[in-house]
């Protein structure tokens, strides 16, 4: 799948690079918002610089530019995992080349390179780089190892988990350790998108995930169990067990709370 994203857990997500128009419009909105912030800061600073030594004024101006061009974009993309104001409005997101969310390092490199390709050249360098790259990357994306993808509107929903009837007995007596969060999420996403994957990729990824999950289950599933059915049974059983554990913990917490609020022996309770 050329247009898929292979995330760290080995699951291909059905997300393609954002179109050039979407990226351009998103960048325009971001630059307009940042420019408005810069203008507001300059207006405030112009009133305050009269009270500051003339030798310090240039340093303050440089600090303001660094704040607006680097600090603000880096902070926004880091906290929102790649969704600035413009990207949010256009339904796109910046992700790593492996499909994972961007971190501080990626956002910082994008903003740092953006000083030259966006601000100093009025976006012309970013325009040329984006048009000549098959994923629409600008120089900041190339340096950070990121690119922009389309995000479907609304919250993704998956079919509810249901235990395969012929595996219910095996799952109830199997020893299942807690799955790592990344592996459990990868298996859940795979099951939710399996019908949209290429058959060869679907079979390969299903076998890979089943092999990883089987390391946390003993004994293994009955011979001949389909990998996807095995994953469905494990995720369903783990969900049910976690739910029972959470209910027991809630009951125990309520009992302990009642015990702590109970008055000592022989002391009358005025509320009764």
Image (spheres, helix red, strand yellow):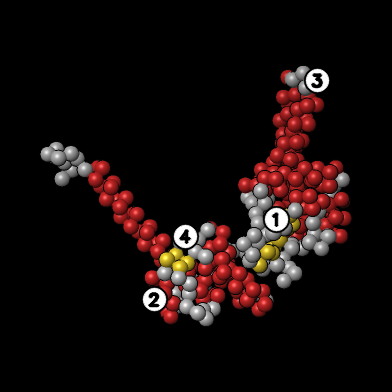
Quadrant showing the C terminus: top left
Q: From the viewer's perspective, is residue 39 above or below residue 249?
A: above
Badge 1: residue crowd in 10 Å (few <14, some 14–19, many ≥20): many
Mark positioned earlier in the residue sequence (1 or 2): 1
Q: Residue drawn 34% across and 54% down? A: 250
Q: Residue drawn 41% across and 74% down? A: 170
State the mark number for residue 55.
Answer: 3
Q: CA distance from mark 1 to mark 2?
A: 42 Å
Q: CA distance from mark 1 to mark 4?
A: 28 Å
The reply to whether discs 1 and 2 touch (Cβ–Cβ < 8 Å) is: no
User: Could you tell whether 213 is left or right of 261 in the image?
Assistant: right
Asked if residue 238 shows in the view, the reply is: no
Q: Provide the secondary structure element on which disc 3 rests.
A: loop
Q: CA distance from mark 4 to mark 2?
A: 19 Å
State the mark number for residue 178.
Answer: 4
Q: Residue drawn 39% across and 76% down? A: 169
Query: Closer to the camera: disc 3 or disc 4?
Result: 4
Q: CA distance from mark 3 to mark 4?
A: 62 Å
């Amino acid at each position: 799948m050329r247009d898929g994203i292979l995330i760290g857990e080995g699951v291909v997500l059905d997300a393609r690079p954002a179109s050039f128009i979407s990226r351009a419009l998103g960048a325009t909105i971001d630059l307009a918002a940042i420019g408005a912030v810069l203008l507001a800061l300059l207006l405030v600073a112009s009133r305050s610089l009269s009270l500051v030594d003339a030798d310090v004024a240039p340093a303050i101006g440089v600090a303001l530019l660094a704040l607006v061009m680097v600090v603000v974009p880096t902070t926004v993309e880091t906290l929102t995992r790649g969704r600035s104001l413009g990207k949010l409005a256009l339904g796109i997101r910046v992700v790593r080349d492996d499909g994972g969310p961007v971190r501080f390092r990626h956002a910082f490199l994008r903003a740092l390179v953006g000083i030259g390709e966006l601000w100093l050249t009025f976006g012309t360098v970013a325009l040329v780089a984006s048009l000549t790259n098959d994923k629409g990357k600008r120089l900041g994306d190339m340096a950070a190892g990121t690119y922009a993808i389309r995000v479907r509107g609304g919250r993704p929903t998956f079919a509810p988990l249901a235990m395969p009837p012929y595996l219910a007995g095996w799952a109830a007596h199997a020893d299942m350790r807690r799955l790592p969060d990344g592996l459990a999420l990868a298996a859940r996403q795979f099951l939710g998108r399996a019908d949209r994957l290429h058959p060869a990729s679907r079979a390969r990824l299903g076998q890979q995930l089943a092999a990883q999950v089987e390391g946390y289950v003993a004994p293994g599933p009955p011979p001949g169990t389909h990998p996807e059915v095995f994953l469905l049974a494990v995720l369903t059983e783990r969900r049910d067990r976690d739910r029972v554990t959470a209910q027991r913990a809630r009951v125990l917490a309520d009992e302990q709370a009642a015990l702590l609020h109970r008055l000592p022996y022989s002391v009358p309770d005025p509320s009764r």
